[in-house]
Amino acid sequence: MTDPIADYLTRLRNAIHASHRIVEIPASSIKREITRVLYEKGYILKYKFEETENHQGVIKIALKYHPVTKESAIRDLIRISKPGLRKYAGKDALPRVLNGLGVAILTTSKGVMTDKEARQHNIGGEVLCYVS
């Protein structure tokens, strides 16, 4: 697998389209941090890290749906920076997703964070994905 983050986002997208409640994804440190950011911003219900016999681990994510309309909290997941073409944003050019209603997830020198947090810390970084 050449792009584990794209695989992570695709698994989430597929689970949402199939209306699954829980999705299991092979773990890595960057995926754990992206999951933490999604939880903090209210896009997923809860998550749990489980160790497996191969020591890689699994992330179990409980997806969040509206109780009446059964519509997912995550409407769109878009991968921005790819292995073949990395996309970086400086502190003055941080992206705004849906005019501030969505979230851009960045990896910075201070860890994985959203575009709003990066603006507060006055730092830029690699734009991993957009979530809306």
Image (cartoon, rainbow, N blue to C red):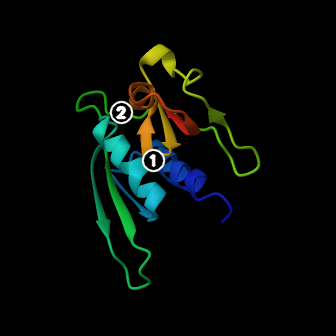
Note whether 120 is above or below 58 in the view shown. Answer: above
Among all residues in the image, which is located at the extreme bottom?
53
Between the C-alphas of marks 2 and 1, the distance is 14 Å
- Label 1 sits on residue: 18
Mark 1: secondary structure: loop
- Label 2 sits on residue: 73
Q: Quadrant of the N terminus?
A: bottom right
Residue 107 x/y as whole percent: 51, 44
Note whether 32 is above or below 95 in the view shown. Answer: below
Note whether 30 is above or below 107 in the view shown. Answer: below
Q: Quadrant of residue 4?
A: bottom right
Q: Is residue 78 visible?
A: no
Q: Residue at x 46, y 29 (%)?
A: 115
> Which badge, 2 or 1, is on the more N-terminal residue?
1
Q: Are marks 2 and 1 in contact (CB under 8 Å)?
A: no
Q: Quadrant of residue 52?
A: bottom left
